[in-house]
Amino acid sequence: MSAKKREHVYTRRLDSAFLAVYNGYVFFLRFFREVFKGRMEFQEIVKQCYAIGNKSLLLIGMTGFITGMVFTKQSRPSLAEFGAVSWLPSLVAIAIVRALAALVTALISAGKIGSSIGAELGSMRVTEQIDAMEVSAVNPFKFLVVTRVLASTIAIPILMFYCTAVSLLGAFLNVTLNEGTSFIAFFESAFEQITFLDIFTSLAKSIAYGFTIGIVGCYQGYNASKGTEGVGKAANSAVVISMFLIFIEEVIIVQVSNYFRI
Amino acid sequence: MEEVNQPEAPVINIQDLHKSFGSLHVLRGVDLRVEKGENVVVLGRSGTGKSVLIKIIAGLLKQDRGDCLVLGQEVSTLNQKELRDLRMKIGFSFQNSALYDSMTVRENLEFPLVRNVANLTRAEINEQVETVLDAVGLLQTINQVPSELSGGQRKRIGIARTLILQPEIMLYDEPTAGLDPITCLEINELINEVKEKYHTSSIIITHDLTCARATGDKIAMLLDGQFLKQGTFEEVFNTEEERIKSFYDYNFIQ
């Protein structure tokens, strides 16, 4: 038998992947343990909500507007083939409310908010600011992680509704320029096919996405190491992992909502 | 050897402390006593585990083996609540100050105070913040953010932030690292003032002999994970031990 001690169970890479999943799970459970424990940092939650919303408002507005306009423009020829251009407002509204608005908001937020949380907490970790909180008898998890996760869970659904409104405005602009449809006629037609389940599903999705972006960003930043390189890695991983999880959640939530739809 | 007439229990009592990181055995059986009101300087080269030692004392790291008693309590066995209560009695000044970048000096100082002391009025908070800022001589920086401060000012604010909870023990991690000689002298004076004014017992981690001589009642020389010698500055450096002599000579030449 070799005298050299084996350093891994499977392969080193597989071991670290399992370890990362386990540590993520522990972090996730800790969030739910800490959220109801001790004093709630309401002021910090409001501050973070404002920072998240304010940071993303313009970008999400512009992206949503362009998405609505381009989607309408691209859908018109197909509907025109069947002489069904009058269905355009309904089609666009269904696409925006059911899928596009939540997804666009989540992906933009993952890039902007997720990376910002990852980098902020990462730099606090490597400059010992988190340790400083701990030795000052303050719970850094409660102050930094719980507040940011709650803030993104609250702010992203609001941003999603904002994105929906702006996307529909973009769609309306395209329709009115091409077909001369009035504002009231467009929105009457658009909301004809929208059900409570569509709005509820969209809200549930954006809550799940907001939570994911917050918790992944915080996990990556809170556990950053290796100096400035670690900060960059934390920001990058926060974006990549949260985007990946967002698509998985999208698939699951769509399946569940379709079950109720039938 | 270092027996002093001290009937009281030591503030910090460390016995046979071991700590490893993977295959790197950093602390290899460290023993240290800090008596009430005493400033102990831990001297040693970079990477010898000086900072690890005070992080174990503050409960930021756990030892692999050995005892670390702080104010009569074994730090590694404390639960969260007990550790929080103990930490309120410990001030930790970090090497890079670790000021919260997004907060002003006032907010940095208020942060531990409002979260640990209940029912303080705004006037009381302001008074306490101004008192400690005045103690470190930086009252004029109260509304500045850390990025606007010099290295020496950041160190002072870092110390002020720890003083706001009126700790019994101060842990200084490289208080003079990266500072010019005059600012170093000011920081040394401040460490002594803190001891006089707040009646603290301290551990000062440094490799700066000027700082050690100016602030230490006792010097402990950490080499290869163990304390090679403990005593007054003269006792430690009046030696034929080659490694201590070379450490002294190197500092002196520098």
Image (cartoon, coloured by chain):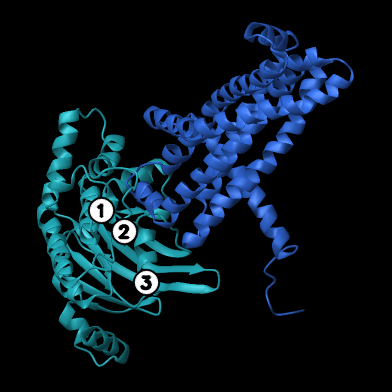
Chain colours: A blue, B cyan
Q: Is residue A179 above or below residue B81?
A: above
**Which of these two is toward me, A171 or B243?**
A171
- Whole-angstrom CA distance, mark 3 to mark 2, is 22 Å
Is A122 positioned to the left or the right of B140 in the image? right
Residue extending furthest right?
A: A82
**Which of these two is toward me, A44 or B15?**
A44
Q: Chain of mark 3?
A: B
Q: Residue B158, labelled with which disc?
A: 1
Q: Chain of mark 2?
A: B
Find disc 3 in the rendering and name its residue.
B30
- Asked if the residue under mark 3 is in contact with the one under mark 1, i.e. CB atoms within 8 Å, the reply is no
Residue at 40% of width from left, 27% of height from top? A42
Q: Is residue B49 above or below residue A27?
A: below
| Crowd tier of the residue under label 2, counting other residues whose Cα lies within 10 Å: few below 14, some 14–19, many 20 or above | many
Question: Where in the figure is residue A193, as x and y percent of width and height?
Answer: 75, 11
Element assignment for label 1: helix
Q: Chain of mark 1?
A: B
Q: Is residue A205 visible?
A: yes
Question: Quadrant of the rendered structure where residue A127 is?
Answer: bottom left
Residue at 74% of width from left, 79% of height from top? A2
